[in-house]
Amino acid sequence: MAALNKEKVEARFGHLFGKVEGAFSCVLGHVGDKLGLYAALKESGPTTSAALAEATGLHERWVREWLYQQTAAGITSHEGGQFFLDDEAAEIYGTEESGVFGAGIFELVAGLVATADRLEECFKTGMGEPYDSFGSQTARGIERMMGPFFRTRLVQDVIPALDGVEAKLRAGAKVADIGCGGGLALEVMARAFPQSRFHGFDNSRMALKRAHSRAAELDNLTIHDTTHSRLEEDASYDLLTTFDCIHDMTHPTETIGAIRRSLAPDGTWFVADVHGHPSFEKNLEQGEVSAMFYGFSVICCMRSALSTPDGEGLGTLGFCEPVAREMSREAGFTRFEKHDFDNPVNDYYEIRL
Ligand SMILES: C[S@@+](CC[C@H](N)C(=O)[O-])C[C@H]1O[C@@H](n2cnc3c(N)ncnc32)[C@H](O)[C@@H]1O
């Protein structure tokens, strides 16, 4: 064995422990989210472990150790013997309806990590797995992760920014959301624009179950399983949306072609997809967040995108702006406008024929 530099070994261990801390903070964040500890902390303001345990009906010793971990991890704060969430943390961890709620991602990570052992097989065979194999917790976690944007930005900021779209939706338009997941974006739009007709398409039974229960409450929303029912390619749609799903698809080229043929001549395809670059080196410049994106890719997005033998395998950062421009141009789209809705993860594209 080569002589090792002691300081570098120590630094490496510091780095390794940082990764372990992140994993535990995520897992315990999920536990705290599920047990209502963040919401209770937000509600109480500065409090003791005993009072928090009492408010949540949990055992004090467990709550105390959880608070120690969360405070050491920089999520909760501690002063004068009391624990609290500062104003920003209270919104991010304790307020599901907030536009900056972030704790839903813990549920998504917990759902995905539970399936991680099966990745060995993917590496050996080359074949990924479809979304359904990621479990119902993952489906709910995705919805909770995306929820804040759909609830607080979609109708308020996004639709008004798209050329002529809001007027069409008010008058009565035909809309589809492809890769609609649990259908939250559709529900928000269908409630805001009751004159319009909305269609959701997905191929995950777990996501479709959630979407169907939403559609049951609304007269203007229909959900379709793409394994049996495909988008009609009849130039009839005024608006097609794809939120963070093109990069997950086994055949994005085919889907983009179908989107083009389904859109009315003056229709709009609105895309939200992960901010990235075609080059690995450039993605690394984004810092640690690129490790998060590549992590999502291996455990979720690329795994889904390689779930058939001929899958294109774009992966989490694979439908970034230059790729989106090129693939939409090749499919026959001629107009491409990028929007900024001040989101740290996604880029947004308004694409037209
Ligand atoms: C990251 S989730 C996004 C869900 C939803 N658009 C949202 O923003 O919450 C990706 C979705 O794409 C769906 N999906 C993947 N491949 C698909 C395909 N070929 N056809 C339809 N949906 C697909 C998955 O089932 C999953 O629900």
Image (tube, helix red, strand yellow):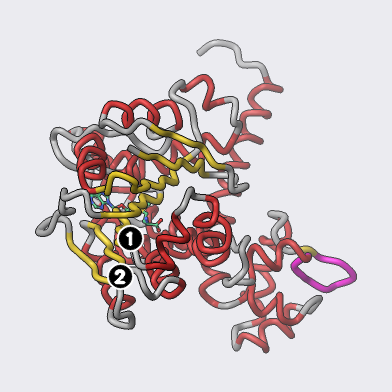
Which of the 4 quarters of the picture holds residue 84?
A: bottom right
Q: Residue sitting at 67 percent across and 61 percent down?
A: 70
Q: Residue sitting at 36 percent across and 46 percent down?
A: 269
Q: Is mark 1 within 8 Å of ligand 1?
A: yes
Q: Which residue is mark 2?
A: 211
Left or right, 42 with reference to 156: right
* Residue type of the residue flagged with mark 1: Gly
View extreme (top): residue: 2
- Residue 48 appears anywhere in the view: yes
Q: Which residue is mark 1?
A: 181
Q: Is residue 23 above or below residue 312?
A: below
* First-in-chain label (1 vs 2): 1
Of residues 160 and 343, the one drawn nearer to the viewer in this rendering? 160
* Residue type of the residue flagged with mark 2: Ala
Q: Is residue 176 magenta?
A: no
Callout 2: SS = helix
Quadrant location, the C terminus? top left
Crowding near the residue tagged with mark 1, few <14, some 14–19, many ≥20 C-alpha atoms within 10 Å: many
Specify the segment rendered in magenta: 78-86
Percent x, y for residue 60? 66, 81
Q: Is residue 84 magenta?
A: yes
Q: Residue sitting at 72 percent across and 63 percent down?
A: 76
- Are discs 1 and 2 less than 8 Å apart at CB? yes
